[in-house]
Amino acid sequence: MWPKNKGSGFTLLEILAVVIITGILISLAIPGANKLILTTRNNIIVNDLKVFAGAFHQYAGENGAWPDDQGSNDAFPPNMEGYLMETAWTRKTPIGGNYNWDKNSNHGGTVFEAVISITDSNESEIIVTMDQLGLIDAQIDDGNLNSGLFRLGRRNIPIFIVSN
């Protein structure tokens, strides 16, 4: 026969109550954490695009023209290494894909003088919803992916217009 040791340890009912309460608290915290992650990713993209646009404007101001098109998705545009070296240009974006520079680029029948796009690459596919792109657009300008500086370009890729 086992000795009765009253007052030490927890009953099965007490442990079950703690597990249920912990599960409820975690289920309440997860949506908030996901929203925080999404907001952080959006903020990084908005900041990156503004920093990149500033670098391209500085280059154009110093050289009298925009740099030539970028050769590949994981490289600096020609003559831009010094302007973009300390930035996230060559890293994967928070939504996947890579930043890409396009000069005199046709998007939806409109030719833009200077555009930064986010494009798929072999190593990194863009994984984003239209809602998330809309939130990014709302931080940059009008919240409409069909107008403004941030919009959808050809093949529905996200673009940031540096110069019309």
Image: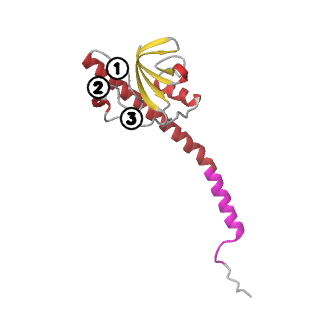
Q: Which residue is drawn at 70% across and 86% down?
A: 3
Q: Where residue 28 is drawn, which disc sits there?
A: none
Give the spatial CA distance, label 3 vs label 2: 14 Å
Numbered disc 1: secondary structure: loop
Q: Which residue is drawn at 30% across and 30% down?
A: 81
* Displayed quadrant of residue 130: top right
Q: Is residue 26 visible?
A: yes
What stretch of residues is rendered in magenta? Answer: 7-26
Residue 45, given in percent of the width and then of the height, sits at: 45, 32
Q: In this view, does 148 lie above or below 97?
A: above
Q: Residue at x 62, y 47 (%)?
A: 28
Residues under numbered marks 2 and 1 in contact, where contact means CB atoms less than 8 Å apart: yes
N-terminal label among 3 and 1: 1
Q: Where residue 68 is drawn, which disc sits there?
A: 1
Under mark 2, the amino acid is: Asn
Residue topped by disc 3: 90
N-terminal label among 3 and 2: 2
- Horizontal side of 157 relative to 13 (left or right) equals left
Residue 17 lies in magenta, yes or no? Answer: yes
Residue topped by disc 2: 79
Residue 76, given in percent of the width and then of the height, sits at: 35, 30
Residue 99 lies in magenta, yes or no? Answer: no
Looking at the rendered image, the quarter that the N terminus falls into is bottom right
Under mark 1, the amino acid is: Asp
Residues under numbered marks 3 and 1 in contact, where contact means CB atoms less than 8 Å apart: no
* Displayed quadrant of residue 100: top left
Other-residue count near label 1 (Cα within 10 Å), few / some / many at <14 / 14–19 / ≥20: some
Q: In this view, does 70 lie above or below 163?
A: below
N-terminal label among 2 and 1: 1
Magenta span dominant secondary structure: helix
